[in-house]
Amino acid sequence: MLETANRRPVAAAGGHGGRSWRMLVVDRRRQGQLVVEPSRRVLLAVVAAGGAGLAGCKGIAALGPVPGLPADVVTLNRAIAAEELMVASYAAAVAKLGAVTTAGGNSAFLQVVTAIHAQHQAHLGQLRRRLVLPPRSAASKLGHGRQLAAAMPDSQAGVLGVLTAAEHAAAARLTTELLSVPAALAQLMASIAASEAAHVVVLRRAGRA
């Protein structure tokens, strides 16, 4: 809550019924990060509304509709969600291949998949560090929950097919989104896309061994 000099409360983050009134801006100056934060204009408007005696939901409603997030923030969040799903898929593949290997499968292929899993975890960390959110503000708009991977096939060949298809699709998707994000983020996404394309080759070679 924000309070005026005469202690009359003005609803802050959440607004009436949990609705957030904050307009968001993106500051791209912090080492290539997308920093989502309330705009200074909106913060000043809230103070002015309180000083004018506009209290509660009515005062906040006077600020107008809540805008959507910038396109590059949405793109980055989509890349994060996709990488989370990739990490979950590799975790499922490692678990499945562990059982297959115990039954006499290809242990070298399991080692390759485990190594690529670690690389995707690193990619996910890099993407997450590029998006900076204020507490109790934009996080609710970007939440996508825990990503659950589909069940893996019981055979090594089946797992190989699932993983190579996922890598190919991810590389293609990231490549098409490079023009919609700032240069520093585009460079990271291009690097990840190239890595995912390389994973397809590595997986196929390991699967034939």
Image: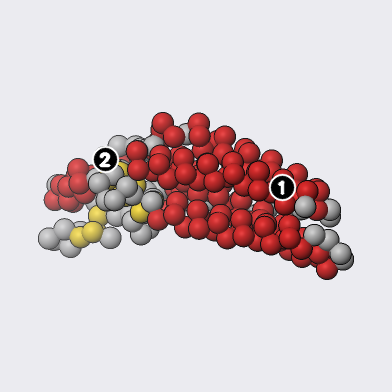
Which quarter of the picture shows residue 111? bottom right
Residue at (29% x, 51% y) in the render: 31
Q: Residue at x 13, y 61 (%)?
A: 6
Circle 2 residue: 63
Left or right side of 149 for 28: left
Q: Which mark is residue 205?
A: 1
Residue 128 at what x, y percent from top left?
Answer: 44, 54
Res. 101 mark: none
Question: SS of the residue at dot 2?
Answer: loop
User: 30 and 46: which one is in front?
Assistant: 30
- Which amino acid type corresponds to the residue marked 2 in the rendered image? Leu
**Looking at the image, residue 111 lies above or below residue 24:** below
Q: Position of residue 199 (x, y in %)?
A: 62, 47
Q: Quick check: 44 left or right of 145?
A: left
Q: Is residue 189 above or below residue 128?
A: above
Quadrant location of residue 91?
A: bottom right
Would residue 7 appear left or right of 205 to someone viewing this image?
Answer: left
Residue that protrudes farthest toward the bottom in the picture: 102
Q: Quadrant of the N terminus?
A: bottom left
Q: Is residue 55 above or below residue 170?
A: below
Q: Residues within 10 Å of mark 1 (few under 14, many from 20)?
A: few
The amino acid marked with disc number 1 is Arg
Residue 76 in percent (x, y) is at 44, 44
